[in-house]
Amino acid sequence: MFFAFIMMGPFGKADRAIIKEENAVIGVSSIDEAVKEAKELQRQGVKAIELCGAFGEEGARRIIEATDHKVAVGFVTHFPEDDDLFRKVWG
């Protein structure tokens, strides 16, 4: 597997999809669960992990540390002027 996108929200173990056998979309319910998933993804050879915006900078740093700085980790963000819109959508 090459790439994974991890989303945080009200997800369970069944909330995952493999795309073309080399990419994954995984739903997790907490940062702790994401850390476990990231370590397993690294063990499987994932080269890059993108995180949804719910992780923020602190959550992204936890994933980077959990993968020993050996997996490229990024996280989704948005423009500050859209903060109100994002609060309406995501709560």
Image (tube, rainbow, N blue to C red):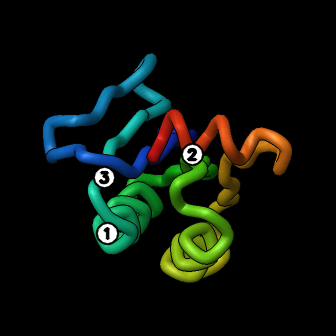
Q: Is residue 18 left or right of residue 78?
A: left
Local crowd size for mark 3, using a 10 Å CA cut-off: few (<14), some (14–19), many (≥20)? many
Identify which residue is drawn at 57% across, 45% down. 87
- Residue drawn 67% across the image and 70% down it: 57
What is the crowding at mark 1: few (fewer than 14 residues within 10 Å), some, or many (at least 20)?
some
Mark 3 in CB contact with mark 2 (< 8 angstroms): no
Looking at the image, is mark 2 or mark 1 nearer the viewer? 2
- Near-viewer residue (4 or 30): 30
Give the residue at mark 3: 28
Tell which tag, 3 or 2, sits nearer the viewer.
2
SS of the residue under disc 2: helix
The image quarter containing residue 21 is top left
**Residue for badge 2:** 87
Mark 2 residue crowding within 10 angstroms, few (<14) / some (14–19) / many (20+): few
Q: Secondary structure at mark 1?
A: helix
- Residue drawn at x 36%, y 41% as measured from the top left: 26
Q: Which mark is residue 36?
A: 1
Q: Position of residue 19 (x, y in %)?
A: 43, 21
Give the amino acid at mark 1: Lys
Position of residue 41 relative to residue 69, above or below, is: above
Q: Earlier in the sequence, mark 1 or mark 3?
A: 3
| Kind of element beneath mark 3 | strand
Q: Quadrant of residue 82?
A: top right
Rendering coords of residue 62 (x, y %): 54, 78
32 w.r.t. 4: above or below: below
C-alpha gap between disc 2 and disc 1: 28 Å
